[in-house]
Amino acid sequence: MKESLSFELLKRDYRTRARRGRITTPHGTIETPVFMPVGTQATVKAMKPEDVEKTGAEIILGNTYHLYLRPGEEIIREAGGLHKFMNWHRPILTDSGGFQVFSLGKFRKITEEGAKFKSYIDGSSHMMTPESSVEVQRALGSDIMMAFDECVAYPAERKYVERSLARTTRWLKRCDDHHRRLETKAATESGSDTMKQALFGIMQGGMYKELREASAKQITEFDLPGYAIGGLSVGEPKDIMLDVLDECTDLLPEDKPRYLMGVGTPDYLFEGVERGVDMFDCVLPTRLARHGVAMTSRGNINIKNAAFARDFRTLDHDCECYCCSNYSRAYLRHLFKNEEILCSMLLSEHNIHFLVNMMKNIRKAIEEDRFLEYKREFYNKYGEF
Amino acid sequence: MKESLSFELLKRDYRTRARRGRITTPHGTIETPVFMPVGTQATVKAMKPEDVEKTGAEIILGNTYHLYLRPGEEIIREAGGLHKFMNWHRPILTDSGGFQVFSLGKFRKITEEGAKFKSYIDGSSHMMTPESSVEVQRALGSDIMMAFDECVAYPAERKYVERSLARTTRWLKRCDDHHRRLETKAATESGSDTMKQALFGIMQGGMYKELREASAKQITEFDLPGYAIGGLSVGEPKDIMLDVLDECTDLLPEDKPRYLMGVGTPDYLFEGVERGVDMFDCVLPTRLARHGVAMTSRGNINIKNAAFARDFRTLDHDCECYCCSNYSRAYLRHLFKNEEILCSMLLSEHNIHFLVNMMKNIRKAIEEDRFLEYKREFYNKYGEF
């Protein structure tokens, strides 16, 4: 059977490992490197999908764990899938639910079979396995589904990380087998020879380079259409993160997209791109927005700051988003102080636009052989506030 | 000096007192009868101004009391006025602040001079007078400003209502004098002969028809460009409200717009129009929205109802708003259960569209001599849910 997803490597930067690429999915193409806004509960918080699209975002993320618990994947299947349910008609990537389950700490238990956990909604007991994660993600109908893995916290003993990544690989096999079985069944019924969804594997291995290598070797044997780097940016210092990431990207195939999970600050995006990462996601821009923090070309600013009370300038005069085209800092501060929903709406749109636009500039810079120059320009301004 | 606002009576219904008219203001025209969404704190809650406009709304309301306390009218003046501050470029009506001040109960004290009150934000003491209310509204730059009045609660002793309405008339004189003085000064400076803002007077008199008559007689002597009916829908039973309203409209000039303050349920809008009211406002549609209640052609529905969990139909199949064109009841329920901001955004847009569209249909029905037929049709459906 043919894969539903393909990746085209359009250009390599001549000095760094940065790459310019294009991913094609059943719901459209994605220019890479790309930042993917997160729509945890079938909505990018405080934004209409049309407004997400207007920022230039080409793909969003949905969270399997949340959607499994509420409203339940069967309701989304009946609705015609996540795209239709939430009125977003471009590509969607769903995570496996693993990360959220493992974040539950004492409220979950891991076995070879999968992970048992208690619902944050009603305390009920649930079991998530590689097979059930694939099934939930099939009900959601995402373009890219992620393998069920264990994301190990930082710090972690080498012994534990080693055992965990071996299990993650065994789980990947179960995900891949189950996914292919279900795709084959569906294809036979519909007479198609193309898969509907793509499965990405996830590299683990904590901060141990040899384990990263072992993990990469094991997961790339599955010849999947894309691979993610998991277990980074989980609390470790930046220098350690970058040091490990430095090794990780080269361990993954050149001709497949590489996705660094859960990363979304401008510096991590630049460093990731420089090391050959193609995809990023993070809740940061929308979460910061709801706390009154705007990401700007001159650094983050807290809009509730008294200095903005009479500041009638635009939030970021280098920005052309809807918020910056129509509202002043004084107005945004007024909305924030009054807990007006419009503040979250405007800042979310601005922050998403900021990161999406930064990635657009990065893509252009790679095309024009000036990635490092653009990086320098960006940092020279960033921190001016 | 010429008034900035004019009213054209386009048509009278042949069986009822319903009227079809047009108000012209410096920021555009308003077709009447009209429902005005409320943007208390310089935002129609959970909506972008463009989306308010897309519902067909032609004028919104701002609350002087709230804007005086936060961010303060001077900041809005410096921003270039309320229109520019909040990015709404059509007409704005501001209330006088009186209603909110008088709702404060023991936290305010009324004297001939004005009303002393304590801020709900920091407990600080403030004094609002007819003159200061006019000045704040001038700083806001609304198209229509309201006179500072006392809205008497229900029930109230006749003696108190009588004394109160006499004071409201004295306050109207002070508002009108101050307004004309400031307009004349501004006109002299700019060389213009047209006022910038229009002042509406407010009829009071509680539920006592003779007092309503007295109030109307006193306020119409000022020959203002419009008049409001205040002190109705303040807790009295519907039959008393309609009985009093029945008398009120005819006491006001035919050639001026009549505004029934704080009224926004479909039945009150129909009854008001039938009795010759041209303008209405209410926070109801956006407040209900934030509580998960949708106003539909078949009555109000609570979206959190379990019956909607798998209901993939549109909220109101007679509605063409953005929400009804793109989302299902199941999705809206999911958003509400997860406290997602998008739920308030979508339901607010729907509810405002619902009332604005109902008024559009009412205007069309008056034009086509079938107002009572439309009213009957509406009620036949309304209550079907």
Image (cartoon, coloured by chain):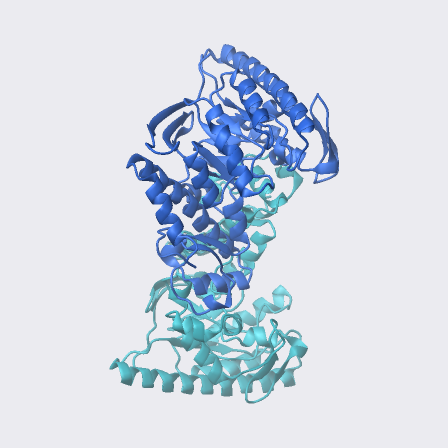
Chain colours: A cyan, B blue
Residue at screen point 42% across, 39% down: B57
Residue placed most toward the observer, A160 or B212: B212
Q: Is residue A217 visible?
A: no
The tally of labels here is: 0
Q: Is residue B99 left or right of residue B194?
A: right
**B260 shown above or below B307:** above
- Residue placed at 51% from the left, 78% from the top? A203
Closest to the observer: B221 or B6?
Answer: B221
Residue B8 at x, y percent in the picture = 36, 24
Residue A245 location in percent, x, y?
A: 54, 70
State which quadrant residue A134 falls in: bottom left
Where residue A9 sits: x, y (%)?
35, 67
The furthest residue to the bottom: A112
The picture quadrant where one finds residue B52 is top left
Q: Is residue B254 left or right of residue B211?
A: left
Quadrant containing the C terminus of chain B is: bottom left
One can see residue A181 in this view: yes
**Closer to the camera in the image, B289 or A94:** B289
Residue farthest toward the left in the current orientation of the protein? A191
Question: In the image, residue A303 lies at what x, y percent?
Answer: 60, 44
